[in-house]
Structure formats: C-alpha cells, structure tokens
Amino acid sequence: MTADHRAGRLERVRAALAERDTDALLLGPSADYRWLLGYEPPGLERLTMLVVSAAGDDHLVVPALEAPLAIEHLGDLGVKVLAWQETEDPIALVVGALAAAGSASQSRLAVGDHLFATFLLRLQAAMPSARYTIGSVVTGPLRRIKDQAEIDALARAGAAIDAVVDRLGEWVVPGRAERDVAADLDVAIRAAGHEQTNFTIVGSGPNGASPHHIAGHRVIQPGDAVVIDIGGRVDGYCSDTTRTLVVGEPPEGFAELYEVLRTAQAAGCDAVRPGVTAASVDAACRDIITEAGYGEYFIHRTGHGIGLEEHEDPYIVAGNDEPLSPGMAFSVEPGIYLPGRHGARIEDIVVCTEDGGRRLNTTSRELRVVG
C-alpha cells in the first residue's frame, strides 16, 4: 500500500469523523490500524495507539522499543511518532496528542473495538468528561466497501485456498484422525501461498453437526460425511471456504440433504446484486432449506463479511436490511446440521459487483466422494 493510498484512507476517516461530529479516532493494533497504516504491531501490554484527529493532526503513541519499526513503516505519511519509555505514562501522551490536535477534555472520541479494556479505562479516568463511542461506527462503513486492490487480494486468497480444496482427497481417507488431517491442511495452506493459517475445521461423522468443531482424535470412518472449513491470509487478506465430502457410500438420506443445501447455496449466490438487502440473501438460502423440512437445522447466519478480518461487516443475516453495494465481500455458507448424525456446509466468498455477484471460490460444489 503506497503512502498516497494510506493518506487517502486517513482523509476518508477524517471526513467520517467530521460528519459524525467526533473529534478523534483512537486505535490499538487491529485490522482498522492495519487498514490505515499498512502494518500491525504486536498487541502487547505496552500501549500502542494511533490518534487520528478530525483536524488533521495525527499521532502514533508507541513504546520506545517499537518506535524504529513504526517510523520505518510510516515513512513520509505525516503521522507524528510519540515514543514512550518504560517508566513513562503513555496515557498522558495520548491526552497530550489530543490536546495538540485541538481536542478538549469534553471531546467526543471513537475508540477502536479491539482496544484493551485496561487502556480504555485508564483513558476514561484521565478524560472523564469526554464522550466515547465505538470506533467501528467510523471505520466500518469505509472498510466494508473494498477497493480494486483489496478485491484482487481477496481473489488471490480465494485461488490459494481453492488449490488446497482440490487436494482434499489426499488427506480425507478412512483410518485418519481429524487432528492429523488438520495438521496436513495447515501445511498445505501455507504451501499454497498463505502467510498464515487462520483455521482448519475438520468435522467427521457426528462432529460435522457442530459448525465450529475443533479437530480431535476421532478417526474418520467409511460412510462418514466430513465438513472441511479452512482459511488463511494472503497479503493480509483472508480466505475462507467450506466443502463437505463423504467417505465411500453416503449415509442414508445424506445425498438428498446435500442436494437441498447445494440448491440453497446457489440461490444465495445468485441473489447477490446491488440494492438487495443482506437479509434477502439470507432468505434466499434459508427459504429453500426450510421448505425442504430442514429449517430448524440451519442454525447460523448465511454469511459474514471478509477482508483484513475473517469476520467483519456486512453480515448476511435476517434483520440486516442494509442494501448491498459494489465492493462488498462476504461469505455465502448455508449449512444443515443433524445432531448426533452428520452435518453439511458449502461456503464461497462472493463480491458484489455492478451487475451481480462474483464468486471468488471456484471449486466444485457437487457432492464429492473420497476414500
């Protein structure tokens, strides 16, 4: 991300602050911080805080030992670095930075959603007359619309995770423990171009009925349905996809259940276009599953936004009447989960375009038999 790119994002934040009559945005290490500055320092017990002022006087309060790295990353961005020594009070530096930017003790401050409570409580004690709100009311509307560079990064992440999905038959075989499959997937995800693995969900047989099952000691058996949900990070942006396989002969009724799910997931993807609501995409999937008699077994929302974070705005869920706009990226991942028996889920990342939706995952969604 170029300095001009980062400067443009800072200007957009300042405009959003002014529109909301808010004096400053305060961010610790987080996706918001990374979106603005292009890097993310470690989230430690030592305070790091970016202070973005509506007046345009920005400061970065950092531990002295982190200052050289911060200065290197910031380059000529124009953010003033305030380094604090181990025996100094960093909150006092934040208060001073706000004062230097023209923010009085009665300021209205937007605070990053992921800032440690210990830092926020100390700031509130130092500025008891200030008014506080969550930072995502400022950054959320900006980050949920991806620019072309971000969409390109998500597409690269999607292609990288698809390369792993194409090889699932190598690892999902009878006699292997879920945890061993997950370990192989971790290696494969990084080998496919991800700088890190975010998660490897392997749910076999009855474990597949738990959407966020943690891979354990259960050994995959013939006749199992196996839910594989995997993701990582490429150039800072996340991948996330789910496919469901069966080992040998499918369980009784599973092929019919899966066809309902496949039809529902396709309907959700087809429903994506500018102006339709997030809730209507959820309904496109849910109505088909409900009509087939599985409504009570679809136990989560249809999707979540994705970008620098695995889960972010917009959320594809009933009650979210926000209209979709070009540049929004999110998952479409309906699932059906029969407790004690098996589960199934299909997930693709979809980008809303000017004339519809573009799936960033392209591997087959047909029922795949392995082993």
Image (spheres, rainbow, N blue to C red):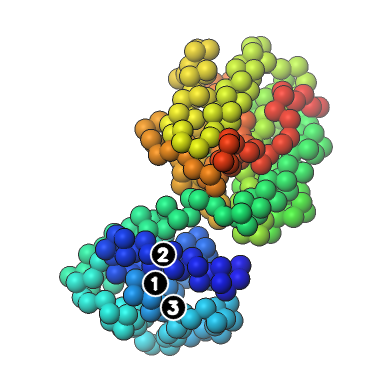
Mark carried by residue 246: none
Front position in the image: 313 or 3: 3
Q: Say if 6 sits above or below 161 in the image.
A: below
| Cα separation between marks 3 and 1 | 9 Å
Q: Find disc 1 in the rendering and name its residue.
A: 52
Q: Find disc 3 in the rendering and name its residue.
A: 60
Between circles 2 and 3, the one closer to the viewer is: 2
> x, y percentage for residue 27?
41, 67
Contact between marks 1 and 2 (CB within 8 A): the answer is yes
Disc 2 marks a residue whose amino acid type is Val
**Looking at the image, which residue is at 61% across and 54% down?**
148
Is residue 200 among the parts visible in the rendering? Answer: no
Q: Earlier in the sequence, mark 3 or mark 1?
A: 1
> x, y percentage for residue 360?
66, 41
Q: Say if 67 sits above or below 120 in the image.
A: below
Q: Earlier in the sequence, mark 2 or mark 3?
A: 2
**Looking at the image, which residue is at 71% across and 17% down?**
250
Q: Find disc 2 in the rendering and name its residue.
A: 13
Count the numbered circles shown.
Answer: 3
> x, y percentage for residue 217?
66, 38
**Looking at the image, which residue is at 36% across and 73% down?**
53
Q: Quadrant of the N terminus?
A: bottom right
Disc 3 marks a residue whose amino acid type is Leu
Disc 2 secondary structure class: helix
> x, y percentage for residue 38?
56, 68
Q: Earlier in the sequence, mark 1 or mark 2?
A: 2
Disc 1 marks a residue whose amino acid type is Val
Q: Say if 16 sits above or below 232 in the image.
A: below
